[in-house]
Amino acid sequence: MPDTTLLLSPEVREALDARRPVVALESTIIAHGLPRPRNLTVAEELEELVRSGGAVPATVAVLDGRAHVGLDKDQLERIAGDPSVRKLGHRDLAPALATGASGATTVSATAFLAARAGIRVFATGGLGGVHRDWTSAQDESADLRLLAGTRITVVCAGVKSILDVPATLQRLETLGVGILGYGTEHFPGFYLTSSGEPVDWTVRTPEEVAAVMAAQDALGGPGAALIVANPVPEAEQLDPELHDRVLAEALSDCREQGIGGQAVTPFLLGELMRRTDGASLEANLAAVRGNVRLAARIAAAR
């Protein structure tokens, strides 16, 4: 029988017991989103940004069949350095725990485990969503349905711009997932400050976000997530013209090469990084840093 008990780091357990602010961080960006050894440097930087904002970082991962919420130095180094670490979505957690596997958690798995641990705020880069050509492939990220049933606040820079952003927003509305634009009236475009799509609600301070979370709790009802859409600063975004041109070329190559299913996203992200000479990666990291800083302030404002 697999052990499904969450292993909280002493720092995280102490903070939760004392009702001090905690921010969950995903581990997929460490294991699969960045080149080594920079990935470990970034992981340590993100945790320090949380602490600088007055909160405790809780990086989430599965190690040897045990779900960890909060990693120590050795565990963080293992996630960053072990090439055999798998990529785990929410659906992969049960097999991983049952077979003693180790894996880095995606948005869906991180949100699930963090909420189960009692953590209310989660910072990430961008969410998954509805893929382009959904009418023919019906490809949709597991992030959306998981967030529809998980009471957690996710600070992100929108959804990945390689996706169908309008369709993703429609899907989130259908699923009852709330969206707040942070200091913006338009939904962010991940690498870009704006996707051009409007948001219904705009907030401008962490205290306003905390007030929405409190109202969400008081109302009760379905335990859906709250998305705080925090745009990357214009000065740090990927050049919009370069983004649009490279993405169009990559999408064309994708069709010509017959790439489909789960292979589409890594192909497009890889092409964006290669054809922008790494500028897309820097915009991604700028977005993540901003989201982590904001998440710590929101957690501290509750």
Image (cartoon, rainbow, N blue to C red):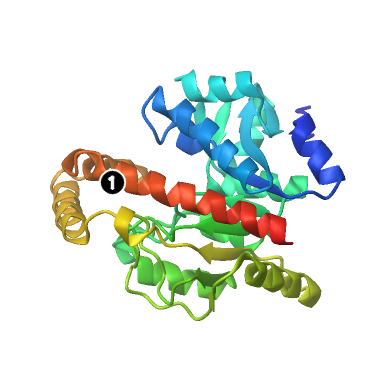
Q: Nearer the viewer, residue 270 or 138?
A: 270
What SS does tag 1 mark? helix
- Position of residue 101 relative to residue 186, above or below, is above
Q: Residue 92 in the image: x percent, y percent?
A: 58, 38
Q: Residue 294 in the image: x percent, y percent?
A: 56, 56
- Position of residue 47 relative to residue 191, above or below, is above
Identify the residue position indicated by label 1 in the image.
280
Q: Nearer the viewer, residue 280 or 264?
A: 280
Q: Residue at x 79, y 30 (%)?
A: 10
Label total for image: 1
- Quadrant in the picture for the N terminus: top right
Q: Nearer the viewer, residue 286 or 155?
A: 286
Q: Residue furthest right?
A: 17
Q: Residue 147 in the image: x percent, y percent?
A: 60, 59
- Quadrant in the picture for the C terminus: bottom right
Q: Residue 279 in the image: x percent, y percent?
A: 25, 44
- Residue 225's image quarter? bottom right
Q: Residue furthest bottom?
A: 200
Task: Evaluate whether residue 192 shows in this view.
Answer: no
- Position of residue 118 relative to residue 223, above or below, is above
Q: Is residue 71 left or right of residue 27?
A: right
Task: Evaluate whether residue 127 shows in this view.
Answer: yes
Q: Residue at x 81, y 37 (%)?
A: 13
- The 10 Å Cα crowd at callout 1, few under 14, some 14 to 19, many 20 or more, is many
Kind of residue sitting beneath label 1: Ser
- Residue 73's image quarter? top right
Q: Residue at x 50, y 81 (%)?
A: 200
